[in-house]
Image (cartoon, grey):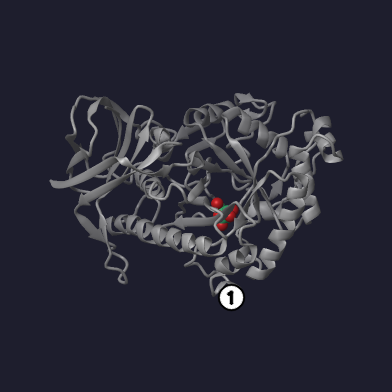
């Protein structure tokens, strides 16, 4: 058995964890929208105005603060006017991101807003800078947010008298695949101009890039820094997408398991720190926030031309917990993060197939972490045994087996403790500096093997177990089982 210690400093507040860090991303890709969300009004599958009831109920429970739509890559192919008006007369278009090669446009802007309203989320719409003009992007804002123009009247004629007040607009998706930075920045500024003419209160998310990523010849330097140099403070958020993978989805080796967590810690912290440096330098004192508006584990064998539904193991759930524990270190800088994707694609929370549905272990992490949303992130100190990335020869950095974060929430504290060790328990001393525990709840998420999954046949194999916290005082010891997430909601005084 190993030992560890976490010291929590309730008086040292790092800042408010933006609820939007627990955001979602849905795309017209594979079966995320069609089957995963939209089944249509006439479906035999129980639905609320065409949207699956089981998915709405599952999402309501975890209270998604924001949902990004319609893509992703699909956003770059999408003309929003195809997706409004009577559904029976909407055009069917060729579409490489759909399993049958066509997009029926049955789920468009009005249906997306309906989903957001049903689950209590803010919409975040991603508009492309490639196949529509800046003027047409402005019309989309008018359609959503105004009362007086022709496009506003079109929304009213379509049965939606009240403006949608969409505040968050992403301008372009992964544009480093398409243009040199100067081209994108020029487009971005032009699009922002037209869109804010339609509604000056909208907040824009500019397309950025992970600084270590150089996918095209024109992105060999720092594509993102060149963009930020040009657009400076003319943005509210700067988008960075981060995908990870290590070995197969459910047949990875122990080395691949540890590599994934080492990569997460090494790569994510270094990317966030570099982006913060760039934003601080060029944005003239404006606190432009980072939007990690696509993130997740994307396993090999699921490319965009094929089946995007992964086996989401306990490893993916522990990754989710560690990902959030890292974001909690940067509360004033990370303004949004959107898991890719909510249903049936990549790092999913929900899997559907016709009338059937189950929740992945990752869903349960979102549920267990609800108390972190909008709470005050606290400084903590972690002491535990460490490991080095077994598959990466270039860094000797030691990663603790214990990942943790803590926040002030309501009248108490919420504490997350992940034991990444595959074999050994950690006897973890938890010390609250200047506060005392007087009770609470402990929730544990684990399984016999990190490769275990939930499935249609065994939907509840990996579920949180809840027990009362009986300890009292400033110090106590938590037994953390191997490859286990423990979340404590503590009442304190
Ligand atoms: O989430 C899947 C895809 O990953 C998105 O369409 C794209 O933006 C990213 O490359």
The one of 458 and 450 positioned closer to us in this rendering: 450
Residue drawn at point x = 76 percent, y = 29 percent? 160
Query: Residue furthest toward the right?
Result: 150
Residue drawn at point x = 35 percent, y = 32 percent? 463
The picture places residue 294, in percent across and down from the top left corner, at 53, 51
The picture places residue 304, in percent across and down from the top left corner, at 57, 55
Residue 196 visible in the picture: yes
The one of 187 and 305 positioned closer to us in this rendering: 187
The picture places residue 476, in percent across and down from the top left corner, at 17, 34
Q: Is residue 402 above or below residue 282?
A: above
The picture places residue 334, in percent across and down from the top left corner, at 48, 49
Residue 306 visible in the picture: no
Q: Is residue 396 left or right of residue 160?
A: left
Q: Is residue 281 above or below residue 291?
A: below
Q: Is residue 62 left or right of residue 250?
A: right
The one of 192 and 9 positioned closer to us in this rendering: 9
Q: Is residue 97 above or below residue 279?
A: above
Q: Is residue 307 left or right of residue 250?
A: right
Dividing the picture into quarters, in which one does residue 91 lie? top right
Q: Residues within 10 Å of mark 1 (few under 14, many from 20)?
A: few
Q: Which residue is mark 1?
A: 217
Q: Is residue 113 left or right of residue 313?
A: right
Q: Quadrant of ligand 1?
A: bottom right
Q: Quadrant of the C terminus?
A: top left
Dividing the picture into quarters, in which one does residue 49 lie? top right
Residue drawn at point x = 18 percent, y = 44 percent? 426
Secondary-structure class at tag 1: helix
Check mark 1 vs ligand 1: CB closer than 8 Å? yes or no. no
């Amino acid at each position: 058995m190993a030992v560890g210690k976490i010291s929590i400093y309730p008086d040292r507040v790092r800042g408010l964890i933006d609820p939007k860090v627990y955001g979602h991303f849905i795309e017209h890709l594979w079966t995320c929208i069609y089957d995963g969300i939209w089944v249509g009004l006439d479906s035999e599958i129980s639905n609320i105005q065409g949207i699956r009831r089981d998915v709405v109920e599952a999402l309501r429970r975890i209270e998604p603060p924001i949902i990004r739509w319609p893509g992703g890559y699909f956003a770059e192919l999408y003309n929003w006017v195809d997706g409004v008006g009577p559904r029976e007369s909407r055009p069917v278009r060729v579409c490489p991101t759909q399993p049958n090669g066509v997009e029926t446009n049955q789920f468009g802007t009005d249906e997306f807003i309906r989903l957001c309203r049903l689950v209590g989320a803010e919409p975040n719409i991603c508009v492309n800078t490639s196949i529509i003009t800046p003027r047409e992007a402005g019309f989309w804002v008018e359609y959503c947010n105004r009362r007086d123009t022709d496009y506003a009247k079109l929304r009213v004629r379509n049965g939606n008298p009240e403006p949608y007040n969409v505040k968050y607009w992403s301008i372009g998706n992964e544009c480093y695949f398409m243009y040199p930075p100067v081209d994108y920045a020029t487009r971005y500024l032009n699009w922002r101009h037209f869109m804010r003419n339609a509604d000056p209160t909208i907040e824009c998310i500019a397309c950025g890039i992970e600084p270590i990523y150089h996918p095209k010849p024109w992105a060999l330097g720092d594509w993102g820094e060149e963009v930020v140099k040009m657009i400076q403070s003319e943005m509210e958020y700067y988008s960075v997408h981060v995908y990870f993978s290590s070995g197969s989805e459910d047949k990875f080796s122990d080395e691949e398991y540890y590599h994934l967590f080492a990569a997460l810690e090494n790569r994510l912290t270094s990317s966030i720190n570099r982006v913060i440096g760039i934003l601080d330098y060029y944005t003239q004192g404006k606190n432009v926030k980072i939007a990690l508006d696509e993130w997740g584990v994307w396993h090999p064998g699921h490319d965009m031309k094929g089946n995007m539904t992964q086996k989401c193991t306990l490893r993916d759930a522990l990754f989710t917990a560690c990902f959030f524990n890292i974001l909690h270190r940067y509360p004033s800088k990370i303004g949004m993060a959107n898991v890719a994707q909510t249903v049936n694609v990549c790092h999913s929370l929900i899997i559907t197939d016709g009338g059937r549905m189950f929740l992945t272990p990752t869903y349960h992490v979102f549920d267990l972490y609800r108390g972190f949303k909008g709470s005050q992130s606290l400084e903590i100190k972690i002491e535990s045994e460490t490991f080095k990335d077994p598959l990466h020869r270039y860094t000797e950095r030691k990663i603790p087996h214990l990942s943790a974060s803590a926040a002030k929430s309501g009248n108490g504290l919420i504490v997350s403790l992940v034991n990444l060790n595959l074999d050994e328990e950690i006897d973890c001393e938890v010390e609250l500096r200047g506060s005392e525990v007087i009770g609470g709840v402990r929730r544990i998420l684990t399984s016999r093997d990190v490769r275990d999954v939930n499935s249609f046949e065994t939907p509840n194999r990996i579920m949180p177990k809840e027990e009362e916290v009986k300890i009292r005082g400033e110090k106590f010891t938590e037994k953390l089982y191997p490859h286990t997430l423990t979340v404590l909601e503590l009442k304190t005084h």
